[in-house]
Image: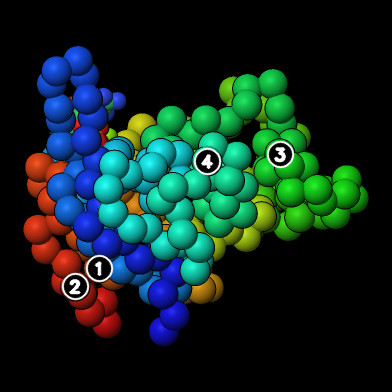
Amino acid sequence: MSKILDMKNITKIYEMGSEKVVALDNVSISINTGEFVTILGPSGSGKSTLMNIIGCLDTPTKGEYILSDKKVAGLNEKELANIRNKEIGFIFQSFQLLPKLTAAKNVELPLIYAGVNLNRRKEISREILSKVGLGDKANNLPTQLSGGQQQRVAIARAISTEPSILLADEPTGALDQETGIKILELFKELNKEGRTIIMITHDKSIAQYGDRILNIVDGKITESGEFYDKR
Ligand SMILES: Nc1ncnc2c1ncn2[C@@H]1O[C@H](COP(=O)(O)OP(=O)(O)O)[C@@H](O)[C@H]1O
Ligand SMILES: [Mg+2]
């Protein structure tokens, strides 16, 4: 299997005046293409810091990070933005859809940045919205959709440019349990089709949906390589 992500001894220190917070402490993670990995840890353990670094939104204080064979540590803002747009599809707890755009236009947005022409954009958004079960909601605004439907639009948007990794931060955190489970099942389906997924959560029952759980406590990965056999 080919490696999509390789982190070695990643440390992130936040400095606030004279105080230093070690948010990540020598984190080493390796993820293969096609894996569904969950990162499980309590509040304050460093999950968001790790997500920001994985997603090329921030750079580590120390350590080496290779994403799709490219070195990330040390890149400037513009280079980070480029690698982020190409390699990462983000899914957030709060969906983060643009409220004035229809579902279809929200899905098309990353395709505009990627330089895809209008006809092709429409084609892709229609196709992907059907894929996530919203073929009939393309012209709805986010306010005209339920929470679960909004998260499906956000997932459609995240996969529209076919990024190397889907990176989800507490994707079911704002949803009721039943709706959340349907979203997790959609992730499983997308993973079965070959997409690499990294999902961050504080909830063990949600983390079980991944094939491998990385536990994070006090900025340290305490356990790795825990595989679950789902058969
Ligand atoms: N921008 C920041 N400046 C200073 N400290 C921060 C910053 N972001 C996070 N921290 C600290 O780093 C630690 C990890 O935070 P975070 O990554 O947000 O954890 P989690 O997402 O697991 O709740 C916490 O102690 C938090 O207070
Ligand atoms: Mg967090």
Q: Which is nearer the eye, 115 or 123?
A: 115
In contact (CB < 8 Å): disc 2 and disc 1: yes
Query: Label 4's element?
Result: loop
Q: Earlier in the sequence, mark 3 or mark 1?
A: 3
Q: Residues within 10 Å of mark 1 (few under 14, many from 20)?
A: many
Q: Earlier in the sequence, mark 2 or mark 1?
A: 1
Q: Amino acid at mark 3?
A: Leu
Q: Quarter of the image holding residue 188?
A: bottom left
* Residues at marks 3 and 1, CA–CA distance in whole angstroms: 32 Å
Residue 212: give its label.
Answer: 1
* Residues at marks 4 and 1, CA–CA distance in whole angstroms: 32 Å
Q: Amino acid at mark 4?
A: Asn
Give the position of the N terminus as an image quadrant: bottom left
Check disc 3 and report the residue beneath it: 109
Q: Where does the image place residue 25, in percent across and percent down from the top left?
A: 15, 47
Residue 225: give its label.
Answer: 2
* Residues at marks 3 and 2, CA–CA distance in whole angstroms: 36 Å
Q: Residue at position x 85%, y 54% from top?
A: 120
Check disc 4 and report the residue beneath it: 76
Ligand 2: give its quadrant.
top left
Q: Which is nearer the eye, 60 or 226?
A: 60
Q: Where does the image place residue 132, in percent across and percent down from the top left?
A: 58, 54
Q: Amino acid at mark 1?
A: Arg
Q: Relative to residue 67, is residue 7 drawn left or right? A: left
Q: Earlier in the sequence, mark 3 or mark 2?
A: 3
Q: Residues within 10 Å of mark 2 (few under 14, many from 20)?
A: few
Q: Where does the image place residue 6, in percent across and percent down from the top left?
A: 35, 66
Q: Relative to residue 164, is residue 4 drawn left or right? A: left
